[in-house]
Image: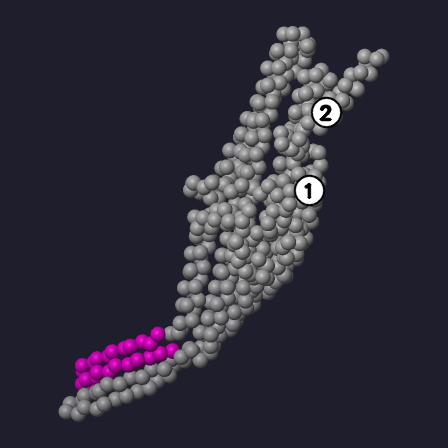
Amino acid sequence: MSVLRSVPFGAVCLLYAAILSATPVTHPSPPVVAPAPSLASSSLQEAMRRIWQASPEVQAARADLDAARARARAAAQPLYNPSLSLDAENADVNRRTAGISLPLDLSGKRRARTSQGEADLLAAEASYNVRRRDVAARWLTAWSTAVLAARQSELGRRRLALMQRFDDLAAQRLKVGDISSPERDLAGLALGEAQVQQATLAGNEAAARAALLAISGDQPMALPPLPNGLSPATDSVMPLPVDELPELRQARAQQASAEAGVQVARRARIPDPTLSLTGGQVRSGPRTDQVIGVSVSIPLPVLNTGRAEVDAARAEADAAAAGVRSRQFVLRAGLQEAQARYAALRGATEAFRSGRAAAFEDRTTLLEKLWRAGEISTSDYLVQLKQSLDTALSGQELESQTWQTWFDYLTAAGRLTDWLDGRTQDGHNQDMTR
């Protein structure tokens, strides 16, 4: 009975000594790190600017914006051009005349077209900002995933090294009779499992890199590091009012364009008169007379009154207004969801960092000491080491998800581009240093 009692007592003593010897110099425990700055680092800002410049999606949105500017200029031009006519006739009476005619925009068609062009330009500007933000959000998500995959792959390589060393030690202890043959087999099986898991992690890292290249292209770029500190708190960013979010600005601009389209259709129903001025001379025998004439013509909207076009434009405007209201509901709900998810994940990350679950190095060192001293069996060592490794990988996954939800929250709050451009909530620029 005394022998059975001495084993757990020795394990407790060795555990206590190992904890005391695990000083921060040799095996540091992860401290509670201060939150990261509430603005992006300069390296991340530079990387994002390069992505925006090289992104085909942003280039296409910029081309659409240039086209909208050109269409707005075209809509502001006069609606009609003058027409010149020359007539000549040789008969009993020789006639030589020249005439000029111009339709008159008396119904305000040009003003209506100008209003619609300006609304379309605002919609294109909002669409450009949304496309630019969406590219940034996708790249940031892919970037954090790639950084996480690299960290997990590095941790997997450490796990593989631990399993290799454990396998070598198990082989040595089997030779001297310290462990049994089944325990030696457990070490070999653990090494094989670690090799399989490392291959999976390497595949995940390659997939994450490919997803990143799908957005950034094949341009060489050193990935900026993921901040070591906690992501910023939710109160560090004040969400924009819903009416000022890019999606709603785009929807309202589209609604304004549809409303202007109604006015364009109404003005198109009103016929415009055409004023013509003719002058010349008529020669009949020895007599020559100077002639001048003025005429006015106007189309009669009898066969096609244009009412159907007005009804169609009115229906499109009603649909755009309903789309604005629907977009408001979606944006409010999305902001609440993103804020709640981010607060929950950030709280979990903070708790993980402050607890012993993050002390991976301390636990692995202690477990190896206990196993070498014979205080724990090979199976117990493998179970606890696997639990430590799984916990470390889960912690990295949690931090990556927290950063991804931070980007989602910035997107829902309408502050993502401000965060990337280094602008504070009052619109001023700040230089970020770490």
The magenta stretch spans which residues? 81-103
Please tell me whether residue 132 is drawn above or below residue 403 in the rendered image. Answer: below
Q: Residue 398, position in %: x, y?
A: 64, 39
Front residue of this view, candidates 118 and 181: 181
Q: Residue at x 55, y 38 (%)?
A: 147
Circle 2 SS class = helix
Q: Residue 428, position in %: x, y?
A: 54, 60
Is 62 part of what is drawn in magenta?
A: no
Q: Residue at x 75, y 20 (%)?
A: 11
**Numbered tag placed on residue 246 in the rendering:** none
**In the rendered image, which residue does mark 1 sit on?**
350
**In the rendered image, which residue does mark 2 sit on?**
17
Which amino acid type is shown beneath numbered disc 2?
Ala
Circle 1 SS class = helix
Front residue of this view, candidates 388 and 60: 388
Front residue of this view, candidates 312 and 243: 243
Question: Contact (CB < 8 A) between labels 2 and 1?
Answer: no
Looking at the image, can residue 341 be seen?
Answer: no
Please tell me whether residue 31 is drawn above or below residue 332 in the rendered image. Answer: above
Q: Is residue 190 left or right of residue 121?
A: right
Looking at the image, can residue 217 be seen?
Answer: yes
Q: Is residue 273 left or right of residue 245?
A: left
Which amino acid type is shown beneath numbered disc 1?
Glu
Front of the two marks 2 and 1? 2
Q: Is residue 237 left or right of residue 417?
A: right
Q: Residue 343, position in %: x, y?
A: 69, 48
Spatial distance from mark 2 to mark 1, Cα to Cα?
Answer: 28 Å
Labels 2 and 1: the sequence-earlier one? 2
Residue lying furthest right: 1
